[in-house]
Structure formats: C-alpha cells, structure tokens
Amino acid sequence: MRAGGEAPHQVLGRLRFLLECSECFRRARALPAALCYVPREVQYKICKDPAAAAAAADRSLLSVWDSPGPARGGKRAARATIEVRKGGCLRATGEEYCNGAGLWVKLSKEQLAEHTGNRDLAEGWLLAQRFGEGGDKLVPVESVEKIQRQHQTLGVDYKPVVRYGPHLLHPRGDRALGAGGCAPHRSVPLGWSYEHDMELGRFLYDHSERKLQHRDCTKEHLSSIEVSSQAEDCGVAHLTDNQPYTVWESNGPPGQHWVRLNMKKGTVMDWPAPCWCLCLVALPSPSYAVCRNSFQDVCILRDMKTHLPVLEIRILECREQGYNVRLRGIKIRSFWEWDLILNSDMFQPARLVRYPLLEGVDADVLYRRAVLIQRFVQLLDSVLHYLIPLPEDSIGTFNSMRPFLLLSKQSTALITHCLQSSESTPPQTPPKLYLNRHLAREHRANPGLDPSCRNAVFTQLYESLRSSKSNQPLDYRWPLSYSQWWECDFITEGIIDNGGGFRDSLSDVSEELCPSSGDVPVPLPFFVRTSNQVCNTRDMYVPNPSCKDFPKYEWIGQLMGAALRSKEFLILSLPALVWKQLAGEEVSWSKDFAAVDSELVKLLEVLEGVDREAFEFMFGRELTYTTMLSDQRVVELIPNGSSIVVHYEDRKEFICLVQKARMEESKEQVIAAMRAGLLRVVPQPVLDLLTWQQLEKKICGDPEITVAELQRFITFEDFPSNDSRIQIFLEALNNFTSEDLSHFLKFVTGRRRLPVQITVYPERASTCSSTFFLPNYSSAKACEELLRYAVYNCMSIDTDKEPWDE
C-alpha cells in the first residue's frame, strides 16, 4: 500500500530525516551528511541556444576559471578552454555555485586534465548557465550504465538525482554518499546559532518575495500574443507593457474571449499570470487554477515538464453577467530563474542592515548556509501534507521547523485548501446595523464619561449583532468573494452602504481597540499600552489583565479570523509575544518580552549579575516579592509577598517569579479566549502552517506603504493618453509619508493598508466602490496640499443621500 503514490517506508524515512535535520538546526549541530550531499561526478551535455547565430555549429568552446566568476565586465582571464562537440558530454563534480553571472559547476584536477590536458590546475569552474540571458547551457544528464550500476548496488528503489533537490529526501541518502558522493559545508559556521538560521530564513523570504514581484522574463519566452478581440486603446500590447494603469479589454460576445500565447521553441514554463479583471476566469481541460477574485496575481499554470508551442487562456464566464473581460498583464517566470534567485551576490552588506545577526558574516558562508536551508525546505515541502494537522504531542517539535515555513512552496496551497474546505454559505443579505459615529467620537475624546463604553463603535456593533433577531449568528467562515459582513447606516450621515460604510466601521473598531496615536486615550478596556510606548518607542498594546469580558475577547478573535479569510484588515498593534501565542508558537522572556517592557528586561539582567554590595546599595530592604503588571496593578508573587524582602541570595528565584508572572499575565484567559474565537473561524491546520509574522500580516496587512507599492494597485480610467493630471497626482503622492498614504487609503477605500484596488476617474469618487475623483489641479504642490487636507479632515460619508431620507 502506498501513500500518495509513495511507499510508506519512504515517507517514514523522510519524516525521520526531517526531524533529525530540524534538531540539528535547533541545537546548532553539524547537519546530516545526506542533506549536504554532493555527487562526486556528474555528466553535462551542451544544450545549444536555438536563437543564437552559432546554434548550428558542431562544437562549443567553454572557458575555465579558477573561481566562480567573473560577473559580466570582469577583467580576469580564463585559465583554460574546453572544446565540446555537438552532442558530446563532459564530466564535472556535482558542486555548484550561483552568483550574479549565473550557475557555475566545478571541475576537479583529474577532470581538468582529461578535458584540457593541463595537470597544473588544482580545480576549475565553468559557467553552466547565464543568469537572465540566452546562450548555450550545460544540462546535467546521467548515463544508463550508471543508473543500472547504482540499482545493483543500492536496490531498484534507489533513485539517484545529480542535482540538489528531492534526492536528499531519500532515507538511504547516507548510503549514497558511500557510492560516490561527498558532504561539504555540513559543519556549523563559527559562532553560528539557530537564531542565525531563523534570521537568514527571514532574509531569504524578504529578498525572494521582492525579486518574484519584479522578475519577469515574458519577452524572452513569448514569440507573439493573439487575442479574440480588443477594445480601442486597450489592445494586446498592454498585456506585456508592465504598466500598472493599462489593461487589455476584450470587445466581443460573452463566452468567446481568449488569449493565445505563442511560445518560443524549447520553452518549458512555470508561469503566473497576474489578472486584473472583473470576471470569473476559468481554463479548459486540463483545468488549473480558477480565479474568483478580481484584483490579485493568479498562478494559472506551473511545473510544466514538456514544451507546448501554443498556450490558450479561455475566459468562459464573466462575473455579474458581464460581457467583456480585462487583464492587466501576463508575466512568465521560468523555473530556472526562480532557482537562480538564490546566489552569493544577494548577500551585499547594504542588504543586511535590517538583519543584525548576519552583518559581518562572509557572503560565501551565508550563501552555503542558505543552500542547505533551501534543501531543508524542499524536504519539508515533500512531507508537509503528512504533518498537518498537528497532533498535540508534535507541536513542540514542529515549532522548530515553523520559521522555515516562510520559504515553503506547499504551505500556501495547503492553507488555501483548508480555508476553502471549511467555508460556510454566507447569508443572502447582510444584517443592517444602525451606528452613531458622532457619539463614538465623543466617547473617544473622553472615555471617562462613559465607563461602560456603550457608545463606542465596537460596542454598538457587538450589541447590534447580538440583538439582531432576524439573522442567525454570524460564523465568518465565508468565501473570499463575500466582501461585506454587515451593512451600516450611520445616523445623521447620508450613506448608502455598498461596502464603504462596512469598511469604515471595521477601521473604527481597529482604531478603538489599538489607537494609532500615542497621544489619545484608549477608548476600550481590552488592550493597554505597553511600557515601551510611554517611552516613545513603538506603538504596542497588550491584552489588559484586569479585563474579564471574555465573550468580547472571543468576538475579537472571530473578527481576526474573518480578516484572515477575507481581503479586509483588523489592524491590531500587538507585539510578537501575543501573535506567537495566538499562532501556537513558543515564547520566551529573552526573545519576546523586550517588546513589551524593555526597562524591566534590562533591570532583571542587572539584578542577576550584580554583586552583593551593589545589590544592597541599589535595593536595600525596598525590594519585595511583588511586580507591576501591564495594567499598572501591583501583584504579589508569593503569599504575603509585599511584606517579604528579597535577599541577595534569593534574587534569581525572584527573577524567575517576575518573569513567570509577566509572561503569563494574560495567557490563561484573555489570549485563550481570543485564540478560541480565532479557531471558530480558521481551522487549526491553517494556524499550524502560518508563522506569527504571516498571521499578523494576513490579519493586519502590511504597515509600511510606499508610493511604488501603492501604484501597483491604482488604475486610471477614462483619462486621455499622456494626461497631465496623472503625472501631477503621482508627483504629489511621492511627497506623502507612509502615514499620509495610510490616511489616503482610508479616505478612498475605508481600509488603511494594502492590498486594495483603487480606480481613479476624472469624475465623482466613491468609498464604497474604492474609486477616486481626480480634479484638474494647477500643480503638484496644490494637489499635495489639498489632498493631504482632505484625507485628514474629510472623514464623514455624507453625499450618498440626504441624512433625513430613508
């Protein structure tokens, strides 16, 4: 019996190997030899570039260098030249190296002597493939004789693979080393720790995410594009112009729209197509991804193994009985360039500034370690679907692997599957709620006048949803396409809520729970400011240990789950200590509590290392077994602790008691209630697959907004070509800070963070439909000043109807 097409003993072998590797990472020990496996010999064959003028030549000349390099423009001379005839092969070691020039393979002294006749060179390097260019390539191949010999030695189920990748997952990997392999770079770098690996993983994730957003090789692999039809000024050229405000628009009968890609000879693609459309995009058989969402990149085909000369995308149905479809563009990303993103040149000192543990480490060391992390992630991906959901006794073991989930290619698909399989049917009509935001503003200005907080938007929503007798309780487990959870009628404001009022109410709830400004009072009792915020560091909040309103904490958890499932955000400025507990990750005093109370962390460090004389001078008999919690309450650490003096020899016991009290001040009840609400909406396997950073980003969005990032989500409609208003508008936005841009998003869409699609018209604006009217400003400066005033001062929705109309 096989699990997913694999023999059970192979799956179990990889699982054991995964645990072994994870333990080595966690304890900073030498990694298993099988993870670092490099074959001693690989045969490479020349693959001629069909587009090159010399493609028909019967031989190729390859330069040999003494080290990987040079990048283009280098001044070093090659040490030797190897001639390879058409269809011929050459032998090299299995060691590879990537830098800005491309992928390099290493030749041993014996192999150099065989190919060049030169016995003076100890080793040499060949450029196997250039990065981002065409040209001849060296492709690894295996001889039939070698495979038969290894099957005789190791068994017929042994599958040797000369490239790095899934071969590492085989439980007999160590035996493969004895059959002609080696394991370089398996030792731990000097001074290296598990924290270094986690930080390196975060660096790889951040770097790869940016590279994948901008790396496009469409023109290298497409010979032409045909379309079924096109509207005026929305032609086929817009599919590849990489402009965020242009689209291809069809102009024909519904159900007959298509885009046909004519591929260059030899292209085998793993490609995502970013669709900006108002339609349901589907593909004919064989079916791939179906896009039900309007404004996001959608991968509709990947992992092709054979060349197809023509690829056709058919749009079978449009949303809301529409006739035509729009695509913002098509991007093609080859699997080879995806792999080459990891190269030694990415570890430049300027890029490591945000990663202090990596600063000063040699780039070659970081690259070699990153390669091993990449292999570990491949191993994790191969068995991830066997690990989820996690049994209770495996959570601790899995937590050591969780930081590497950022790099996983399988976790996103598993998360999507878990969310879709747990969806419920949304209500036919959302509940209509009447909210008085004027009373809510008065409450925010002076919360002491209303200790019950009944006028806060949060309380009005909570009570209205509870008392809504005509509707069933909301479960928030709706499909991504269900975008409005309730309908708002703001009293004394003229609003017809088609989504804008709902998003405004959610932003109001976020602002009441965790105010973005440190100069205003906190209008609700659920969270309190951390001590750090008082010291003007970061705006952070922690659950209030004194608040026992657990049903409302559970509802907050449900709203967080609903935000995770949808395109909405619930912006909560919580430290890693809270997010980790919500995600089920381990927390520690040394790593996590400094974001809550850095002064206390420093004080306890001083207290632990102080000598007796200094201890008596600093504390005398004033230090007792008490501590102050986040809500400023002083609690006793032991019975009658306020009357018992801490002596020098008991200081470490006191430190442990303080740490325990502060770390657990809200865990047992408050955070447990929030997590219970979160799990009512989001399945446990989803939380198992998310790191705490990903959980925070999915619920709260990205706090940093740049103009370049915002431009990706702005579309200009009905403007003449080269309209000066567009240039003036973009120039004005360039002078906005991240906070200004957040207010601009709130003004236009009701949301404060990206991603959210904005359409700019030369006509009337609407928060409900996320559209913005762009007047004809006299200059960029005038546009900047008036726009900044509007986004900070014009917050009411009062133009949909007269406030007294019903």
Image (spheres, grey):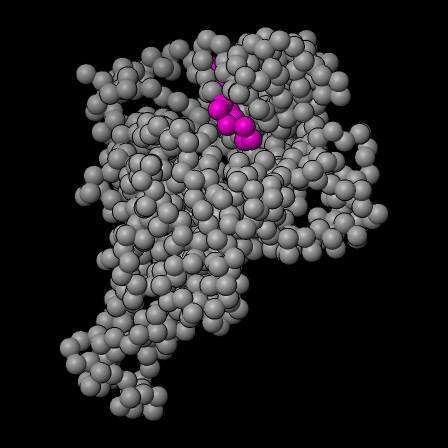
> Is residue 429 depicted above or below 787 in this figure?
above
Q: Is residue 62 left or right of residue 511?
A: right
Q: Position of residue 441 (x, y in %)?
A: 51, 60
Q: Nearer the viewer, residue 28 or 592?
A: 592
- Residue 183 in sight in this render: no
Residue extending furthest toward the right: 778
Q: Is residue 226 left or right of residue 599?
A: right
- Per the rendered image, the range of residues in magenta is 291-306
Query: Does the magenta segment cover residue 154?
Result: no
Q: Position of residue 745 (x, y in %)?
A: 60, 46
Query: Does the magenta segment cover residue 302?
Result: yes
Would you identify the image quadrant in which residue 80 lies? top right
Q: Residue at x 37, y 47 (%)?
A: 464
> Is residue 672 depicted above or below 211 in this figure?
below
Would you identify the image quadrant in which residue 710 lies? top right
Q: Residue at x 29, y 41 (%)?
A: 680
Q: Nearer the viewer, residue 178 or 72?
A: 72
- Residue 578 in sight in this render: yes
Q: Residue at x 59, y 21 (%)?
A: 137
Q: Position of residue 115 (x, y in %)?
A: 56, 22
Q: Residue at x 30, y 27 (%)?
A: 170
Q: Position of residue 580 (x, y in %)?
A: 35, 52
